[in-house]
Amino acid sequence: MIDLTQYEDAATLNRWFINNYPMGRIDLAIVEINLDKGIVIFKGSVYRDINDAAPAVSNYAKGERDDYPAHMRKWYLEDTATSCIARCLTLLKGSNKTAPKESMVRATSWSVEPKPELERELLQVNPVESLTREVENLRELHCEGGVRMLYKAGISKTTNKPFAGYVCVCGQKCQPVWGTAKGDGTFVFKESING
């Protein structure tokens, strides 16, 4: 059972920040938003002084409209923004709890139904198995200058999607060869590459 007395609400955290850092600043940015799917990710940054070059703390909060009860869904953006700021202030205060009290109340009281389509997607693609399969099937590719190309794979920091491809290291600025992702987690490469 979660002890809610161990958490502070957003309003209390805001008052603490104003009292302790009257010249402080809070920046909030939308990192990702998809209104059709009802998903938003905020990044919050808190500065002790408005002139500080870097934030004292930063944190993220993700909100999904469909995870909220029907009467709260139209406020999921505001709620996620508030949660993001409160998380930052909790970190700045040095608490060992990052979530604000409001988030923990929801965590203990809301009944969120599992999303069957997401479960099916996760069961279909096992990242470790697909990456192992990909590595086992690696071909040795060469650039136009005959130099072996370097294989790169991972999750893109900008799109948050998997990528795989070959990049040249010969210094002639040869074009990279990026694979096209298939539904099973593997990648298909154009056959016109020298191998």
Image (cartoon, rainbow, N blue to C red):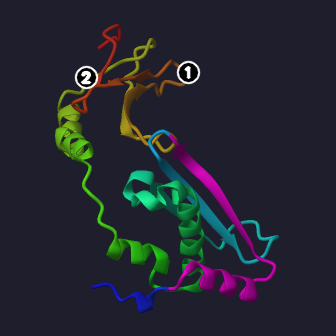
Circle 2 residues within 10 Å: few <14, some 14–19, many ≥20: few
- Relative to 133, say whether 32 is above or below: below
Most distant residue in the bottom direction: 5
- Residue that carries the numbered disc 1 in the rendered image: 173
Question: Can you see residue 98?
Answer: no
Q: Quadrant of residue 29?
A: bottom right
Amino acid marked by disc 1: Lys
Q: Position of residue 58 (x, y in %)?
A: 59, 67
Tell me the residue at 37%/18% (across/down): 142
Indicate the quadrant containing the N terminus: top left, top right, bottom left or bottom right.
bottom left
Question: Can you see residue 144?
Answer: yes
Amino acid marked by disc 2: Arg
> How many marks do you count on the picture?
2
- Residue that carries the numbered disc 2 in the rendered image: 139
What's the magenta region?
8-35
Q: Is residue 20 left or right of residue 193?
A: right
Circle 1 residues within 10 Å: few <14, some 14–19, many ≥20: few
Identify the element where label 2 is drawn. loop
Tell me the residue at 36%/89% (across/down): 3
Identify the element where label 1 is drawn. loop
